[in-house]
Structures are given as C-alpha cells and as structure tokens.
Image (tube, rainbow, N blue to C red):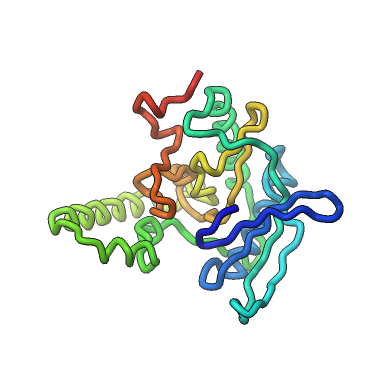
C-alpha cells in the first residue's frame, strides 16, 4: 500500500477480515511509543463513538533483512473512500466534530504507566537530526534564505515557549491530520494513521503545508488553511 518510515500492507485473513499491517522499520518508533499509540486508540474506541483503527495483533518478526526484528501491527480496516483534495462541506463539518471529540477525550485521558509519545517541540517541527533535515541541509540554498529560515525557527521556538503546557490547550494530538488521513464514509469523517500522535498544543492536530515533512514531495494542505479557489471545499 505505502512505504515511508513504515511499510503498509493489506492482508485478508482466512476468517474474511481485512487488515492493514504496519511494518515498523528499525530506527523508527520505540516499542514504548507504539504501545502508547495502541493504548490511546483502544481508549478512543472504548470511550467515544469514533471509528478508529483497532489493533488485532502486535508482534516482532525477524527476517534475513531485519535480523533484530521489526514490530508488525495488524489494524482493522477502516471503511471509507479518500476524501480527495476538495472535501464536501458536510465532511468538513463532521471533521470538526471528530477533532472536537479527539480534543475532549485527550483532555480527560489518563495515560497508563510507561505511556510515551514524542513532543511537538521545535526540534520535532523542524525535523532536526532526521534524514529529511540532512537532505535539506545538503541542498544549495541562498544564504539569505537560510538566514531567514533560522530566524523563523527562532521565532517559532519563542511562540511555543509562550504557549506552555497548560492542560486547557496542551495534550495528545493526532499531529498528522492532513487529507490523506481522513476517509469519507457516507459523509462521516473517519481519521486514520495515529503514528505521529504527540504531546502538543491543540493547533498541531492539523498538519499544515508549512510544517509537513517532504515525505511525498506533494502539496499537503488542510481544510483549515485552504483559501485559494482550487482548495475551497466543494458544495
């Protein structure tokens, strides 16, 4: 299905159930972070009416390519069609309901012992120390542009520090809610791919084109940021 920091594979079981199997490559999420993702998904399924991926199995599998083993997680298949670049007004409205439910649940969520997820600090938002950052650093960039980017990062750090970690606006967020991760099920918005779920302020639920990683090289806008005519919701 897809390859990035993880490999995604569709699997149909003998019992007739369709799953999405995520192969978590070495060097990615730690076992503690993956366990925390599954814990939040289980809590969302238990406490809300949202349709979210549910883990059917989680195991470490060793192969000749990965002798140390790779974590494999089988998730339930979430039905729905890709919402496309111009989601309907109905879907955008329902997505607002879903985001509100996610925020409300996160506000009252009590993480179990050992719950570990990354934080959306400046290093995370600028992809410091990652493969993406190394690739960007190796590209020829005008020194004035590089200076401007550094100043922007410094200002962003000051803004994040000012936001603080008040529980009223800080908690678990999806952190990758672009349109690729929203399915349209008869007008109902269904959110998938909680792999980037992090501690952060509620605005970081959206993954805007300015904070997105260059993993696909394509524009990735959110409905909340779309202002140009081609990007406005369809009626």
**Figure quadrant of residue 203:** top left
Give the residue at x 36% y 24%: 229
Tell me how many marks there are. Answer: 0
Q: Position of residue 60 (x, y in %)?
A: 69, 72
Give the residue at x 27% y 55%: 153
**Figure quadrant of residue 9:** bottom right
Q: Considering only vertical position in the picture, is 185 above or below 102?
A: above
Q: Position of residue 45 (x, y in %)?
A: 72, 46
Tell whether 104 sits left or right of 16: left
Tell whether 103 sits left or right of 133: right
Tell whether 163 sits left or right of 20: left
Of 138 and 202, the residue lying toward us: 138
Q: Position of residue 23 (x, y in %)?
A: 62, 64
Q: Considering only vertical position in the picture, is 152 above or below 5?
A: above
Extreme residue in the left direction: 144
Q: Considering only vertical position in the picture, is 145 above or below 85?
A: below
Give the residue at x 43% y 55%: 215
Of 75 and 112, the residue lying toward us: 75
Give the residue at x 54% y 54%: 197
Of 168 and 177, the residue lying toward us: 177
Extreme residue in the top direction: 235
Q: Position of residue 109 (x, y in %)?
A: 63, 50
């Amino acid at each position: 299905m897809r390859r990035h920091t993880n490999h995604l594979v569709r699997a149909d079981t003998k019992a007739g159930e369709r799953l999405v199997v995520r192969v978590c490559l070495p060097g990615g999420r730690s076992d503690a972070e993956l366990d925390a993702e599954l814990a939040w998904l289980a809590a969302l399924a238990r406490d809300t009416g949202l349709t979210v991926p549910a883990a059917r199995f989680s195991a470490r599998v060793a192969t000749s390519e990965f002798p140390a083993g790779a974590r494999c997680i089988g998730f339930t298949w979430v039905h729905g069609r890709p919402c496309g670049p111009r989601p309907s007004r109905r879907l955008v409205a329902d997505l607002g309901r879903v985001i509100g439910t996610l925020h409300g649940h996160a506000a009252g969520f009590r993480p179990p012992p050992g719950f570990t997820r990354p934080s959306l600090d400046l290093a995370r938002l600028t992809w410091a120390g990652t493969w993406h950052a190394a690739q960007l650093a190796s590209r020829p960039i005008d020194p004035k542009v590089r200076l401007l980017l550094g100043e922007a990062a410094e200002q962003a750090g000051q803004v994040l520090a000012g936001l603080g970690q008040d529980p009223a606006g800080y908690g678990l967020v999806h952190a990758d809610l672009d349109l690729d991760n929203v399915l349209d099920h008869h007008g109902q918005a269904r959110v998938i791919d909680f792999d980037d779920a992090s501690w952060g302020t509620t605005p970081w639920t959206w993954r805007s084109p300015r904070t997105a990683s260059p993993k696909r090289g394509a524009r990735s806008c959110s409905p909340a940021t779309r202002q140009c005519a081609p990007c406005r919701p369809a009626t």
